[in-house]
Amino acid sequence: MEIAYPQIEEAAREAFTDAPPTHDFSHTQRVLNLCMHIGRSEGADLEILYAAALLHDIARKEADEQNQCHAELSSLKAAPILEQAGFPPEKRDDVLHCIATHRFRSDNPPATLEAKVLYDADKLDAIGAIGVCRAYAYGGENGQRLYDSFSPADLESPNTESISKITNHKEHTPIIEFRMKLSRIKDKLFTATARSIAESRHRYMLKFFNRLYEEVNGIK
């Protein structure tokens, strides 16, 4: 039976109707592109990755509204979509595992190569130029300040929990997000291909935030 990929893609697109720019369908498309690139380099199953990338955030809206883990809820929601699209039964659990374990702020790590590739691709979309764009778009969505003073001593701030979950979005800022999460991503990736991509993206972020500090403080 041929897999109805257009059906899977359509289900993914519909899930992002009226979604904010930080997590709209363009994020899914970028993660999909990264998955295909990293997956080919690492020898992963591209069939599993294609479906997992399309569906990895499919329940984000509901999860945010219900204060649930979007990765776990997306995995549950993806199961009937895969079945209806004729996705091979022997690979469905692999896709669902990829989706369930792709979240950064989680204690449920990816165990398969494909899950590690999806995790890496999703994290790469949070850093570099696109990462800066998304951090500030998210800040705008939540009424955050553009910038505030920050030091390494503030990493373990009362605004975070043990897994770095944000407890007060309005008190968060993009620079805190950089120090708390984005600056750490390059060291949290699983695949060599993703780590190589992350190096240049990380350097770009450092350059951006250093320049921001200089401009805010009247140095340049």
Image (tube, helix red, strand yellow):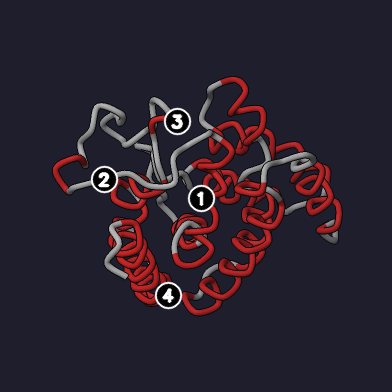
Mark 3 lies on residue: 169
Q: CA distance from mark 1 to mark 3?
A: 13 Å
- Asked if 80 appears above or below 87 in the picture, the reply is above
Q: CA distance from mark 1 to mark 4?
A: 22 Å
Q: How many marks?
A: 4
| Horizontal relation, residue 191 to residue 93: left or right | left
Mark 2 lies on residue: 149
Mark 1 lies on residue: 136
Residue at the extreme front = 218
- Report the residue at 37% width, 33% height from top: 165
Which mark is first along the chain, 3 or 2?
A: 2
As helix, strand or loop, the secondary structure at mark 1 comes to helix
Disc number placed over residue 197 in the picture, else none: 4
Disc 1 + disc 4, Cβ < 8 Å = no
Which mark is first along the chain, 4 or 2?
A: 2
- Report the residue at 27% width, 67% height from top: 219
Badge 4 local density, few (<14 within 10 Å), some, or many (20+)? some
